[in-house]
Amino acid sequence: MRLVVQVKLLPTPGQASALKATLRACNRAATHASQVAFAKGLKDRNGLQKEVYADLKAAFGLSARPAVRAVKKVVDAYATLKANLRAGNLGPPTSRRYRKAVGAPVVFRPEAAQPFDDRCLSWQYDARTVSIWTVAGRMKNIRFACSPDQLKTLVEHRKGESDLVQRGGKRFLIAICDIPEPEVFEPVDFIGVDRGIVNLATTSDGTNYQGRRLSRYRRRQARKRAELQAKHTRSATRRLTRRAQREKRHATHVNHKISKEIVSVAVGVPPARAKPRAWGSTGRGIAVEELGGIRERVRLRRDQRGTLSSWPFHQLGQHLAYKARRAGAPFIEVDARHTSQSCPRCGHTERANRPDRDHFSCRRCGLAGPADHVAGVNVRDRARSAWVFVTAPAPTP
């Protein structure tokens, strides 16, 4: 599996100026190549490279490999645009967004990410420095900072390109690491995970990860955002951008903590620096509801739309999936219909089984409990049946 490792660069002022100039030159060159590709209909890499290669080196000061990577970035951008158009992500062909996308060449931001291969960038892991090509020449001994776990992953598994990124005046290197996946073990059972807004996650073991703190944090950020938007100044806009990035990082951190603990419980290994909860038996898989397209299926009041739009359920599912793969634990998605209205004991399904958001009470057998916990149990039970179906041998003809 592929894992992304991000390290922070710690350049000197001179090195920082050279990196900034390099990003701007590479993106100006990519925008020029994009304009040529759009005007002449060149979307293949070889044809575009023959057309613009000499210009990128002469007019923008790029050496051979950065010029090639700039062309590749343009080709990838048009391939992504074509895929989005086919998938309908930009609306129908008559929509304004669709027409705008196809009516002008792709433009690259001055500080957009730029890929570097091993000929342009080399890592010195022991010294925690990198050497990178810039428009001012080869810059050596640029320090970087990362955790010991990240450094170990880089040393053992880094392969391919690394992307130079600038965000908020800081510079980062994003490296791709190819990590071998362990063989998925046969689970003795499953942990069902019900995802929600009030409770971010509730497991079939009864562990509840409440979303109150995240909701309070987001409400406070929304108030601050409204105050800044009312000022209509450049400094307010810059602060809005920083706040949005901070809020996104905070939600990602919360999802990482929750998913890490759930996977650790499933495989029976408590996470480091975490308060152990009710650890379950080892060797269990993880099951979640399949919630794709829920924003299109659900109709909400206007005051609820912002909450649903900022609900990070998809990211939590992604974190659970890749952490389960790294641990070799089975991961499965099951049908989400009526998980909080169906009785796990007698199977009776009725809307009246859930009289309010927090409580479940079966109208037939009388089973009662927290609604989210019952939903987690139903997810677990469905995963048991689904796993037997998936792993069953194919019938012989």
Image (cartoon, helix red, strand yellow):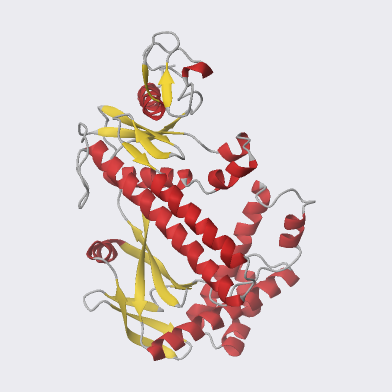
Foreground of the two, 71 or 152: 152
Residue 301 vs residue 354: left or right?
Answer: right
Residue 158 vs residue 268: left or right?
Answer: right
- The extreme top residue here reads 364
Image location of residue 108, percent across then percent down: 60, 72
Measuring 59% from the left and 73% from the top, which residue is drawn there? 109
Q: Quadrant of residue 380?
A: top left
Residue 97 vs residue 321: left or right?
Answer: right
Mark yes or no: residue 71 visible.
no
Mark yes or no: residue 44 visible.
yes
Image location of residue 15, percent across then percent down: 40, 87
Measuring 52% from the left and 49% from the top, which residue is drawn there? 310
Foreground of the two, 284 or 270: 270
Foreground of the two, 304 or 8: 304
Image location of residue 280, percent across then percent down: 22, 32
Q: Quadrant of residue 14?
A: bottom left
Image location of residue 182, percent across then percent down: 27, 44
Q: Which part of the image, by quadrant, shows the C terminus?
A: top left
